[in-house]
Image (cartoon, helix red, strand yellow):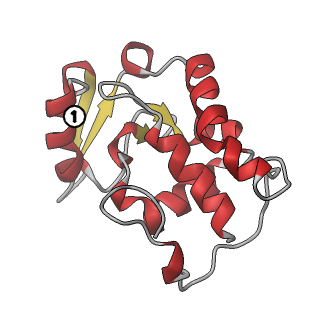
């Protein structure tokens, strides 16, 4: 996975405002990647961006119920939680997307603005959806600092 693709996804996630959520599919449409690629990037490099604002199509972040709870309470998404299902040892929280989803057109404008330098500085437009596998070991030069920007 090249650094530009990762950076586009992470910058798009940073555009989701507090109190709102979006889906892996929406982020994927905005940056030209599949939802699966977005999820993989978030799992590997998304710890310094507001990962709790990106959910699956059901409004969940499977496997992160206990970790997402505090973020959703603080930002107000939990008030819109439709269900909390106990799946054994893990609680899966779900938001009502219709109530807390970010406006996609506003998000698109923000994403285009914050990724413009990635297109112009490198002489390319956003890549299309790719089935390229993400490497097992991430390039540590592309890890994010506490500021949310690449080192």
Q: Is mark 1 on a helix, strand or loop?
A: helix
Q: Which of 4 and 130 is in front in this view?
A: 4
Give how far across and how far down residue 34 sits, in percent: 69, 50
Q: Residue at x 54, y 61 (%)?
A: 41
Q: If the image is split into quadrants, where does the N terminus sit?
A: bottom right
Q: Nearer the viewer, residue 12 or 34?
A: 12
Give how far across and how far down residue 53 sits, in percent: 38, 38
Residue at the limit of the structure toward the top, as seen here = 99
Give how far across and how far down residue 36 sits, in percent: 62, 55
Q: Is residue 141 above or below residue 93?
A: below
Residue marked by disc 1: 72
Quadrant of res 17: top left
Q: Does any portion of residue 55 appear in the rendered image?
A: no
Q: Is residue 3 above or below residue 39?
A: below
Q: Does any portion of residue 31 appear in the rendered image?
A: yes
Q: Which residue is drawn at 14% across and 32% down?
A: 74
Horizontal side of 125 relative to 30 (left or right) equals right
């Amino acid at each position: 996975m090249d650094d530009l693709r990762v950076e586009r996804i992470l910058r798009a996630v940073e555009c989701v405002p507090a109190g709102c959520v979006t889906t892996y599919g929406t982020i994927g449409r905005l940056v030209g990647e599949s939802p699966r690629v977005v999820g993989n990037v978030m799992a590997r490099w998304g710890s310094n961006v507001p990962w709790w604002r990106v959910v699956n199509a059901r409004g969940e972040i499977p496997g992160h119920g206990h970790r997402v709870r505090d973020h959703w309470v603080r930002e107000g998404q939990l008030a819109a939680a439709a269900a909390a299902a106990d799946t054994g040892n893990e609680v899966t929280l779900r938001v009502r997307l219709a109530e807390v989803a970010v406006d996609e057109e506003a998000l698109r404008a923000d994403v285009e603005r914050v990724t413009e330098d990635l297109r112009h500085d490198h002489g390319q437009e956003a890549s299309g959806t790719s089935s390229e596998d993400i490497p097992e070991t991430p390039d540590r030069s592309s890890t994010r600092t506490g500021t949310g920007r690449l080192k």
